[in-house]
Amino acid sequence: MQKDDFKENVRYTITLRAADGKLHPANIYVYKRFDTAMIVRMTDKSGFLHKIAYDDVTRIVKTLVVDSQHQFFIPAPVLDEKTWKDRNVMERYSSAPHMGK
């Protein structure tokens, strides 16, 4: 896959290639796109943020655009590319203002 296949603040159901080469389904929410990877939250797992390379995504199964009142907020410095230079996972809590959290 490529950067242009994904948009920020959109939920996707994808087929993801794990480090061991096996394919797994994953539900993600895209926060930020970089040239070779994107920062996402796995919506069906823990609250960790993950950096996923576009090459690790083999297929987009479903796309759901999230309206502005249900978008999750993460401070911009956390999503900055230099913050993710040497890491692949980060624990960070976020919520949507509309949900009262």
Image (cartoon, rainbow, N blue to C red):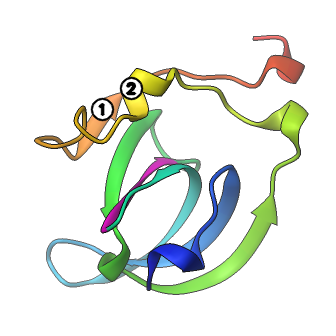
- Give neighbour class at mark 2: few <14, some 14-19, many 20+ (Cα, 10 Å): few
7 vs 39: above or below: below
38 drawn magenta: yes
Magenta stretch prevailing secondary structure:
strand
99 drawn magenta: no
- Give neighbour class at mark 1: few <14, some 14-19, many 20+ (Cα, 10 Å): some
Q: How far apart are the alpha carbons under marks 1 and 2?
A: 9 Å
**Label 1 close to label 2 by CB (< 8 Å):** yes
The residue wearing badge 2 is 78
**Tag nearer the camera, 1 or 2:** 2
Q: Which of 90 and 74 is in front in this view?
A: 74
Give the left or right position of residue 29, taking residue 10 as reference: left
Residue 34, percent from left and from top: 38, 57
The extreme top residue here reads 101
Residue type at mark 1 is Met
What residue range appears in magenta?
Answer: 36-41
The residue wearing badge 1 is 90
Residue 68, percent from left and from top: 86, 38
Secondary structure type for disc 1: strand
